[in-house]
Image (cartoon, rainbow, N blue to C red):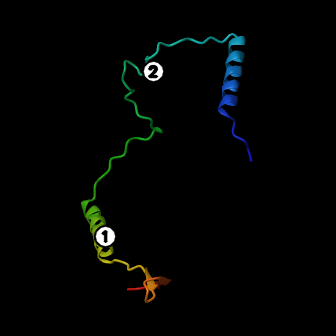
């Protein structure tokens, strides 16, 4: 089983990698707090695609109506059926003391 690194270990590793980067001549530029990575404050309009053109879709109302009808018929059937569960019944003696518990199907 592989042990996950703790947050302290991750922090030390990031500090070490940052120090190595700076030692090799790398530079870190600071960015103002609240600055955004958005272009002119807006998201890019280009959606991620795999080079395929956007497909047009045709709604098929008959198929959708049939699916909805089956779904409603199923829910109506299940709504009318209540399953009776066995319930506990306590048997008492002549003095009102409980003797035993039995399960009753009614």
User: Residue tagged by mark 2?
Assistant: 37
Give the position of the C terminus as an image quadrant.
bottom left
Res 62 quadrant in image = bottom left
Quadrant hosting residue 6: top right
Which residue in the rendered view is the most extreme toward the bottom?
Answer: 94
Q: Is residue 24 visible?
A: no
**Camera-side residue of 64 and 6:** 6
Q: CA distance from mark 2 to mark 1?
A: 49 Å
Q: Is residue 50 above or below residue 77?
A: above
For disc 1, the neighbor class at 10 Å (few under 14, some 14 to 19, many from 20) is few
* Disc nearest the viewer among 2 and 1: 1
Above/below status of 14 relative to 84: above
SS type, badge 1? helix
Q: Measuring 29% from the left and 53% from the top, which residue is drawn there?
A: 58
**Is label 2 in a helix, a strand or a loop?**
loop
Report the residue marked by disc 1: 75
Circle 2 residues within 10 Å: few <14, some 14–19, many ≥20 = few
Left/right placement of residue 76 relative to residue 13 reads: left
Looking at the image, residue 90 sits to the left or right of residue 14; the answer is: left
Left or right of 75, for residue 102: right
* x then y, percent, for residue 89: 43, 82
* Depth check, front residue: 74 or 96: 96
Please tell me which of labels 2 and 1 falls first in the chain.
2
Q: Left or right: where does residue 2 sit relative to residue 46?
A: right
At a point 70% along the width and 16% down the height, the residue shown is: 19
């Amino acid at each position: 089983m592989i042990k996950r690194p703790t947050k302290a270990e991750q922090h030390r590793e990031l500090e070490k990698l940052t120090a190595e980067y700076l030692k090799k001549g790398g530079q870190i530029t600071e960015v103002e707090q609240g600055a955004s990575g958005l272009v002119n404050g807006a998201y890019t309009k280009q959606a991620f695609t795999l080079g395929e053109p956007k497909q047009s879709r045709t709604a098929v109302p008959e198929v959708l109506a049939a699916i909805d009808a089956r779904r409603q018929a199923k829910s109506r059937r299940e709504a009318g059926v209540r399953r009776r569960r066995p319930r506990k019944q306590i048997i008492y003696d002549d003095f009102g003391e409980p003797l035993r518990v039995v399960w009753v199907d009614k």
